[in-house]
């Protein structure tokens, strides 16, 4: 049971990090986003759980 809870907690933590990184990349100036190959249109916020 604790392993399942730990997997769920880890999945939520990973999703949180992904959303934070996406927000930070979307706040960069368009020139820098273009240089690093980040898409122009912001992606939808989705929670993708690995289970």
Image: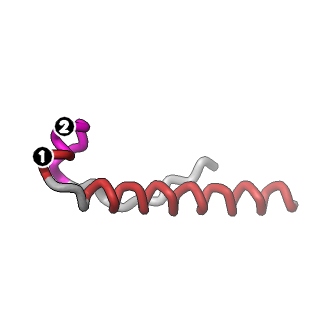
Residue 35 on image: x %, y %: 19, 37
Chain part drawn in magenta: 33-41
Q: Name the residue under label 1.
A: 31
Q: Mark 2 points at which residue?
A: 35
Q: Residue furthest right?
A: 1
Residue 48 on image: x %, y %: 50, 53
Residues at circles 1 and 2 in contact by the CB criterion of under 8 Å:
yes
* Circle 1 crowding by C-alpha within 10 Å: few under 14, some 14–19, many from 20: few
Q: Is residue 17 above or below residue 39?
A: below
For residue 20, the mark is: none
Query: For this view, does 42 lie left or right of residue 22?
Result: left
**The N terminus lies in which quarter of the figure?**
bottom right
Q: How many marks?
A: 2
Q: Which of 3 and 28 is in front in this view?
A: 28
* Circle 2 crowding by C-alpha within 10 Å: few under 14, some 14–19, many from 20: few
As for residue 50 lying within the magenta part, the answer is no
At a point 51% along the width and 63% down the height, the residue shown is 16
Q: In this view, does 46 lie above or below 38?
A: below
As for residue 37 lying within the magenta part, the answer is yes
Query: For this view, does 8 lie left or right of residue 36?
Result: right
In which quarter of the view is residue 7 placed?
bottom right
Residue 38 on image: x %, y %: 24, 43
Q: Distance between the residues labelled 1 and 2?
A: 6 Å
Query: For this view, does 17 lie left or right of residue 32?
Result: right
Q: Is mark 2 on a helix, strand or loop?
A: helix
At a point 19% along the width and 45% down the height, the residue shown is 32
In which quarter of the view is residue 24 placed?
bottom left
Residue 50 on image: x %, y %: 60, 48
At a point 16% along the width and 48% down the height, the residue shown is 40
């Amino acid at each position: 049971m604790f392993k399942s809870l730990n997997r769920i907690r880890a999945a939520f933590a990973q999703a949180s990090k992904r959303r934070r990184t996406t927000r930070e990349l979307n706040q960069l100036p368009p020139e820098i986003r273009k240089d690093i190959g980040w898409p122009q249109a912001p992606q939808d916020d989705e929670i993708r759980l690995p289970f």
